[in-house]
Amino acid sequence: MADFRISRGEDGAAATLHVAGEIDLAVADDLREAGLSCLESNDPGVRVDLSEVTFIDSTGLGALVSLRTAAGEHGKTLHLVNVPAEVSRMLELTGLTDTFRVA
């Protein structure tokens, strides 16, 4: 299994989570908690940079959906950025492509 890493940064307009490795059952809660922490900030939204993600399963997708829902409840936005082909394909296969703002 690829090492999972998550770090938080700021780009001025939104908090940014940089995610790397595999997003699966073992780490989905870590991703969700990090995203929820960003939503508590004064930033108008959260960007999730997936450029270094090598794999995502249904629990990882569930964590992202949960974050998108929570962002809406906080009046904020959630954007997925630098989405690799593997993740994009999973979004397409599960019908979630239109659920997320992808940049």
Image (cartoon, grey):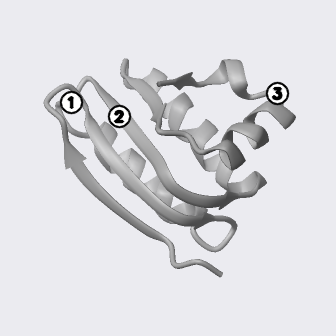
Name the N-terminal-most of marks 1 and 3: 1
Residue under label 2, please give it: 46
For label 1, the residue is 43
Residue in the image at 53% along x and 25% along y: 102
Disc on the earlier residue, 3 or 2:
2
Q: Residue at x 32, y 49 (%)?
A: 37
Q: Estimate the spatial distance between the alpha carbons at disc 1 and disc 3, rounded to whole Å.
A: 29 Å
Looking at the rendered image, the disc whose residue lies closer to the viewer, 1 or 3, is 3
**Can you give x and y, in whole percent of width and height, for residue 16 in the image?**
30, 42
- Which residue occupies the foreground of this view, 67 or 48? 48
Badge 1 amino acid: Asp
Asked whether 32 or 6 is in front, the reply is 6
- Kind of residue indicated by mark 2: Val
Residue at the limit of the structure toward the left, as seen here: 12
**At x 40% / y 47%, what residue is drawn?**
35
* Relative horizontal placement of residue 50, taking residue 14 as reference (left or right): right
- In the picture shown, does residue 102 fall above or below 57? above
Judge from the rendering whether residue 77 lies leftward or rightward of residue 42; answer left or right.
right
Q: Which residue is mark 3?
A: 95
Badge 1: few (under 14), some or many (20 or more) residues near its Cα, within 10 Å? some
CB atoms of marks 2 and 1 within 8 Å: yes
Residue 62: x and y, percent?
68, 46
Residue 97 percent coordinates (x, y): 71, 25
Q: Quadrant of the N terminus?
A: bottom right
Image coordinates of residue 27 in percent, x first then y, are 57, 69
Q: Is residue 59 above or below residue 97?
A: below
Disc 1 secondary structure class? loop
Q: CA distance from mark 2 to mark 1?
A: 7 Å
Q: Residue 95 vs residue 65: left or right?
A: right
Q: Residue at x 48, y 64 (%)?
A: 30
Q: Local crowd at mark 3 within 10 Å, few (<14), some, or many (≥20)?
A: few
